[in-house]
Image (cartoon, rainbow, N blue to C red):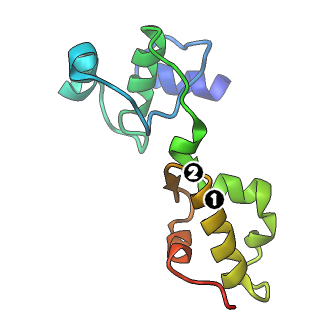
Amino acid sequence: MEDQNQFYLHYSLDPIEDGIIQTGVLVASPLFHRELFERIYTNEYPVETRCYEQIPLSHEILARGLFQPIDTRFNTVFFERMLVHYPHLIDKSMKSYDDLASLGVRAELANSFFLHFAYDPAFIRYLFLKPAA
């Protein structure tokens, strides 16, 4: 939590007990959220880190009490799911690696609304590689 507080402090924002949310998938309406997005994207906050608008947007959403979690299947990160369900895929020298990776990626895609390839975008290729019969 202390490192998350440092991110907020970098932007001169008060730390929030709820921490930082991943703002990659949002459900928003111009009618209700226009002012929030204008505040974030009209240079009120400096964008000088690789997090871009994540920290100020997270702060605004949490501070305004707008955060409502959505089904995690809307933003499944394959690498995170791999570490839990397919840890053997860390060893890329394994025999039949391509077949096993393809099966894992396809299984996660079948169980997700959106499959994200953060951390290792090379896994995208397994969407198109059919396992050996």
Q: Is residue 98 above or below residue 9?
A: below
Q: How far apart are labels 2 and 1 at the CA level?
A: 6 Å
Mark 2 is surrounded, within 10 Å at the Cα level, by few (under 14), some (14 to 19) or many (20 or more) other residues, namely some
Q: Which residue is mark 2?
A: 112
Q: Is residue 124 above or below residue 31?
A: below
Relative side of 69 to 33, left or right: right
Residue 105 position, x and y percent, is 62, 67
Counting every numbered tag in the picture gives: 2
Task: Determine whether the residue tagged by mark 2 lies in a helix, strand or loop.
Answer: loop
Q: Which quarter of the image is occupied by the C terminus?
A: bottom right
Asked where in the image residue 5 lies, by quadrant, the reply is top right
Identify which residue is drawn at 52% across, 59% down. Answer: 117
Q: Is residue 113 above or below residue 60?
A: below
Mark 2 touching mark 1, by CB under 8 A?
Answer: yes
Q: Which residue is mark 1?
A: 108
Identify which residue is drawn at 56% across, 13% down. Answer: 16
Going by the numbered disc 1, the residue's amino acid type is Glu
Task: Determine whether the residue tagged by mark 1 lies in a helix, strand or loop.
Answer: helix
Asked where in the image residue 3 lies, by quadrant, the reply is top right
